[in-house]
Amino acid sequence: MVAFALFLSACGGGGGGNNNPPPTASVSANPATITVGQTTTLTWSCGNSTSATASGDWSGSKALTGHETVTPATSGTKTYTITCSGSGGNVSASAQVTVNDLPVPPTASISPPSATVPFGETKNFSCPATGVPAPTVSWSTDIGSVSASGVYTPPTTQPSQFLATVTCTATNGSGPPASSSATVTLVSKMVSATPMGIYCAKASCVKIVRVVVKGFFPGTTTFDSSPKIFIGPPINDFRGFIESFTTVSSDTYDLSMVFDTNRFDPGPIDIWSTNPSPGGGESNHLQVVFKGNLNTGAVASSKIFQLDQAAKKVWQFDANGNLEKSFDVGTGARGIAADGDFLAVSSGTAVNTYRISGSGIASGVAPNGGAMGVALGGGYACFAEDTAGTVSCYDPSVINPVANSVSVGNSPVSVAIAEIDGTWYCVAFDTSNFTIYLLRLPDLQLVRAVTLTGLTPASDLHLAVFRSGSQLGVAAVLDPAGKTIVFVDLRTGQEIRRVAFDGDALRIAADNTNGKVVIAFYDHVASVTRFGSIDPSNGGVNNLTTTADNVPIALTVSPDGTKTNSGNRSAVVVVNNQ
């Protein structure tokens, strides 16, 4: 019960004072705390009074004493005031009543009701809850963890199942707790896919792709169980499958993919990772593009060099194709070049130079972007950085060289070095815009750019440049899909001519001694590689009589012009250049 009373008195001086006593007032409410719809009883009393008036949350004239039951219709703090009046003056008293809302049991509704969450990522859930009083919300899950704010995190170790439940629970004491749950499908996710290398057999080429998977890898060479990684759908009619994989680290794997074509560049390849949960569909996919127009073979003096990306080595052979030794070049090597006593190897993280007469790395530089093609000549080393859109050069004889770089085109891939009329140049070819750039060494000053038209986009275009002989300063570009070779005079920037051919062309190489371009074709019927030669000035393809029992991913010509070297991984087939 809450009651308030106020007494007022009047006083006067002398013999003429007011003898009327002051009024008194009191009011109380019982109970003082109720719920909407419940009643409380007001009790009041006015002394020395002739009238009583109610105000606040009640009104009207009242008896000098009494009881009254009130039923507040709304919640809040209600004030009931009584004013007592008499000849001695006025006085008021008040009583307050706390009116609460009706209790309402809690409700909860989680959002979203379902979600797919890749391992290594998080998902925010919300849980709007209602009830009187306002409920509190707590979170729980059976797999992984969920924060007090509803942020779900998958487990870091492989769970027994790939379906998790996230639950929010609302409580307020007005009824049983209310819960709402969401289903979480846990999926592995590829976060990167990088082409690492190519090697070819008679009927197909194997592409090696390094994938980084957040989650749990299938761990099977058949890749036909859940979870699964696969190639698809077919792009450019090139179909393939994942033959095997190698574990690099806890989340990194090298996939060996086989395609039903011996083309070096099948164009874009989609690699899919599927949902590992029962009945799951595709989780995500990444696209990789193989750039197969790089030189993976080289000659220097009487030595032949062949890059084996799978073995992470460069093999050295004598002039007859007999293996002499190897250089360990690490993962991700893309192109090689040789000149004098130097062997240069480009990769995604470095361009290293080795001394042929010695062992180990003689010098190296770190590219701005992934280094693709590399070239040696005239005491210079040049390399193309397709992702950075630059061409760089350095002195390979310096232990810690500083590379000079220049922006060139959109995505330069192939490079060559040639001395033309007493000046050394780096020749860069951008396969995205079909442009040949002539850059003066060592400052890489752009002398001219020659843009070729009518070439086939996304084909494995291949560049060869004559470094000496009667065709010095002539560049040749092979367009296998377009079945064309384009000859360009780098001195003038003029196109000399185009030569059409039949067959599945693989590689070209400049025969400096004889002034011809040697071209390798794969004969699918006989399962051999055939060779031809083309004069940049006139005539068509002159078929050579020799064949090689391999598919060349590198084609070179001996310095004296008598031999053609057909290289693939750890073997080189040397045939007569006739």
Image (cartoon, helix red, strand yellow):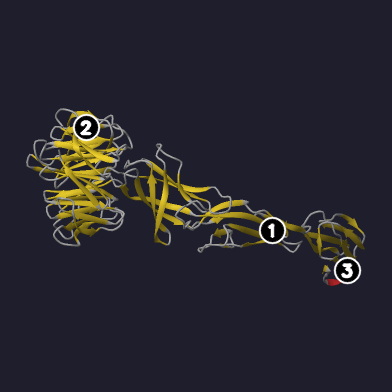
Residue 465 versus residue 339 in the image, above or below: above
Q: Which residue is mark 3?
A: 21
Q: CA distance from mark 3 to mark 1?
A: 66 Å
Q: CA distance from mark 2 to mark 3?
A: 124 Å
Q: Earlier in the sequence, mark 2 or mark 3?
A: 3
Instruction: Point out residue 547 in the picture as x, y percentages from the top left corner.
Output: 22, 40
Instruction: Point out residue 67 in the picture as x, y percentages from the top left corner.
Output: 91, 62
Secondary element at tag 3: loop
Q: Which residue is mark 2?
A: 486
Secondary element at tag 2: strand
Q: Would you say 249 lies left or right of 114 here?
A: left
The disc labelled 1 sits on which kind of residue? Answer: Ser
* Mark identifier at residue 366: none
Q: CA distance from mark 2 to mark 1?
A: 72 Å
Q: Would you say 65 lies left or right of 417 here?
A: right
Residue extending farthest to the front is: 526
